[in-house]
Every structure is written in structure tokens, then in C-alpha cells.
Amino acid sequence: MTMEILSETSIPMAELKDELASIKKRDEELNFRASKTEEYLNQFVELDAKKAKELYDKIDKLKVPRLKEQHINKVIDLLPTTVDSLKVLLQGYTLTVNSENMKKIVAVVQDFVK
């Protein structure tokens, strides 16, 4: 039996945490890798999946040019609260976002940070 990958989609860590929880509920326990992933997510994920989706929608509505789903998900995962931290986050991608749009993104993120 051969498994075939149908598609790859970027998701925020908060959504992954929910998926692992539903798998754990279904199977009663997780395998080794999934357990380690769950451990990591419990330490670092600050938003629940509902809040992450809400934040995604708000950032997406800003209509920042060239900002794709994977970039928005990374912003949701790391929640940068300053323009400098957002610049560092986006340096890993071949993406240019002007400072005005960065300020808008940071303002939206700050509304969700405790």
C-alpha cells in the first residue's frame, strides 16, 4: 500500500495543536513523534485555534502585497509585537513588506497578545 500526498497546506501551530488533540482523543494515545510535537506546542502556542483563525482573517484583510498564507501563519505562530521582530521573522523569506504594512500587521497582532 503506497501513500500519496494529495496536497500540502501551511497551518498555524494552534490548529496543529487542535488536530493532535482530536487524534489523541480518537486513538487514546499519540505515537512518539506526535507526543514530542504536542509537548512542544503546549509550551509555545499562545493562541487557541479560534483566535488564530480570527487573527489570520484580520491580517489577510489588510491585503498586504505578496504576503501569502505561509507568511501569515508564521506571524500567528510567533506573534511579533514590534516592527523589528516582524522584520526578523520575514527575513527568512524572499519577501519585501513596506514599513507601513508592517506597522499595520504589528498593530493587529498586538490586539491578540496577552
Image (cartoon, rainbow, N blue to C red):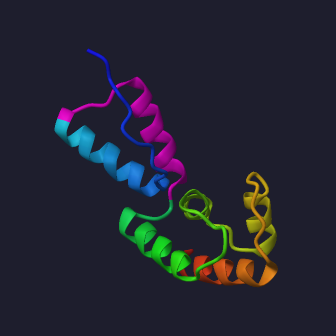
Image position of 7 (left or right of 55): left
Could you say which is closer to the camera, residue 96 or residue 42? 96
- Residue at position x 50%, y 56% from top? 45
Residue 29 within the magenta-colored segment of the rendering: yes
Span shown in magenta = 27-45
Principal SS element in the magenta part? helix
Query: In which quadrant will I find the N terminus?
Result: top left
Position of 44 relative to 102 (above/below): above
Could you say which is closer to the camera, residue 53 or residue 29? 53
Position of 62 relative to 28 (above/below): below
- Residue at position x 34%, y 52% from top? 18
- Residue 109 seen: yes
Query: In which quadrant will I find the C terminus?
Result: bottom right
Displayed quadrant of residue 53: bottom left
Could you say which is closer to the camera, residue 42 or residue 74? 74
Residue 85 percent location from the top left of the image: 77, 66
